[in-house]
Image (cartoon, rainbow, N blue to C red):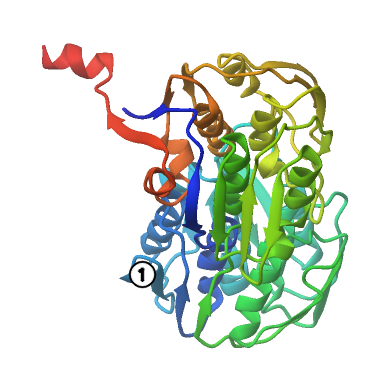
């Protein structure tokens, strides 16, 4: 297996460029299924989830060409199947977007139940409710979600809970439906706006993205397009917190500062300095870190995908902090791993109590999921001594060249291949 080895307690200093947004890319790539032409998508992050999504499209007949490491050309005109049931589909949550895209194109879709990070029940009931409102019927049989419609007709869809995934899927299904669809209580995340902008660049008529009411006037044709994905707010936030945890000074480039306002506000409350520029932020920390209470909320609130990272930071802040997780169940599983560093974190349901300690000590930990893995990296960078992180495949699902980027900022971090016990025994 591959592991990260980190010799910590060195401040991060320098400049880092943020890659394209993972959450936008894994929605926009399947959205290309709806195009009647060829799409060229730029600023795509070079991460495992993107590679997997491109592979899934190829399996159903799309042609995906890598122009360079951050640009894909996607030709979906010859897709020959509305069924996507490979192991690749089962390994990522975003594969559920194939349902909306294939339903929008073929009026049929059969897709394996999605996988991804395991931190609680993540139902697709709101997705299916939206499809039903557009005239589709559905069934779940043998691990496949089957959706079909004689015709898709625009309708009003009220989301019982704010769901990013369901909002995206309903947009995908409705963009070529007859008539007008209005999604009420829609999610407002930046990557939903990016998806709408991508589809509009092909000729879709979507308005209101970024608000809680999205209006989609169905069209019969979507042209090819050339489009650049927004920067990744979660990658940017992770480097902001890593800089604060190591008492560093880093210019974080290629960002949209407005997307980072909730993260910036909490860091400033903790005592971290953040200077804002047009497309960059300077983060530096030269004083004591203060306790802070955090509640995760749908956008524009504090993002749940930044909760593990800020918990790692608050572990070395003065005083006791309270973290409320209001989006996902069971997202605090990683705290047992953080406590191996000497953190003092106790969890009761969706609430974590973090008692700040003066220092962390390097240890061996596992990355239980993508963002929990980022928290382990932050703790390892801040800790005295050596940290070994296993299961780094989770981290590489969402962070492009994380070892190289951190190394360029002065971190002592390496990725090392370590044969597992089974491989050693087999060799013997």
- Up-down relation of residue 81 to residue 351 (above or below): below
Q: Identify the residue at image location x=68%, y=24%.
A: 315
What residue sits 52% from the left and 79% below the top? Answer: 227
Percent across and percent down for residue 247 are 59, 37
- Residue 368, horizontal then vertical, whole percent: 53, 28
Image quadrant where residue 407 sits: top left
Look at the image and tell me in which quarter the C terminus lies: top left
Which quadrant is home to the N terminus? Answer: top left
Viewer-proximal residue among 358 and 376: 358
Count all numbered tags in the image, as a single digit. 1
Does residue 301 appear anywhere in the picture? yes
Q: Nearer the viewer, residue 389 or 103?
A: 389
Q: Badge 1 is on which residue? A: 64
Q: Is residue 49 left or right of residue 169?
A: left
Q: Nearer the viewer, residue 39 or 331?
A: 331
Outermost residue toward the front?
286
Per the image, label 1 sits on a secondary structure element best described as strand
Q: In the image, residue 203 lies at what x, y percent?
A: 63, 88
Q: Is residue 214 left or right of residue 197?
A: right
Q: Work out whether 160 lies above or below 245.
A: below
On screen, residue 240 versus residue 89, left or right, reads: right
- Relative to 185, is 304 above or below? above
């Amino acid at each position: 297996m591959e592991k990260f080895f980190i010799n910590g307690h060195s401040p991060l200093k320098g400049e880092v460029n943020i890659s394209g947004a993972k959450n936008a890319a894994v929605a926009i790539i399947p959205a290309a299924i709806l195009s009647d032409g060829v799409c060229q998508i730029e600023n795509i992050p070079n991460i495992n989830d993107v590679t997997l999504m491109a592979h899934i499209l190829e399996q159903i007949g799309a042609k995906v060409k890598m122009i360079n490491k951050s640009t894909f050309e996607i030709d979906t005109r010859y897709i020959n199947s509305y069924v996507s049931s490979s192991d690749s589909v089962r390994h990522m949550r975003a594969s559920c977007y194939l349902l909306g895209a294939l339903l929008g194109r073929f009026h049929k879709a059969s897709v394996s139940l999605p996988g991804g990070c395991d931190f609680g029940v993540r139902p697709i009931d709101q997705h299916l409710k939206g499809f039903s409102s557009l005239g589709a019927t559905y069934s779940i049989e043998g691990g496949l979600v089957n959706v079909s419609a004689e015709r898709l007709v625009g309708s009003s869809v009220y989301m019982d809970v704010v769901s990013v995934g369901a909002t995206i899927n309903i947009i995908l299904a409705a963009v070529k439906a007859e008539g007008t669809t209005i999604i009420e209580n829609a999610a407002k995340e930046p990557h939903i706006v990016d998806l709408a902008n991508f589809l509009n660049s092909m000729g879709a008529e979507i308005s209101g993205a970024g608000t809680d009411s999205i209006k989609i006037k169905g069209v019969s044709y979507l042209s090819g397009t050339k489009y650049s994905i927004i920067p990744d707010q979660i990658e940017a936030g992770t480097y902001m917190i890593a800089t604060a945890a190591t008492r560093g000074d880093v210019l974080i480039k290629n960002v949209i500062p407005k997307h980072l306002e909730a993260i910036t506000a909490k860091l400033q409350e903790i005592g971290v300095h953040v200077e804002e520029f047009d497309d960059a932020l300077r983060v530096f920390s030269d004083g004591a870190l203060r306790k802070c209470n955090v509640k995760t909320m749908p956008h524009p609130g504090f993002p749940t995908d930044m909760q593990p990272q800020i918990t790692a930071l608050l572990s070395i802040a003065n005083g006791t902090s309270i973290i409320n997780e209001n989006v996902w169940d069971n997202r605090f599983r990683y705290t047992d791993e953080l406590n191996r560093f000497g953190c003092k974190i106790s969890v009761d349901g969706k609430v974590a109590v973090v008692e700040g300690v003066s220092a962390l000590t390097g240890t061996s930990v596992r990355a239980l999921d993508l963002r929990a893995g980022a928290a382990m990296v932050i703790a390892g960078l801040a800790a005295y001594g050596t940290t070994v992180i296993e299961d780094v495949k989770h981290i590489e699902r969402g962070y492009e060249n994380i070892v190289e980027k951190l190394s360029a900022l002065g971190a002592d971090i390496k990725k090392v291949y370590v044969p597992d016990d089974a491989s050693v025994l087999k060799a013997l």
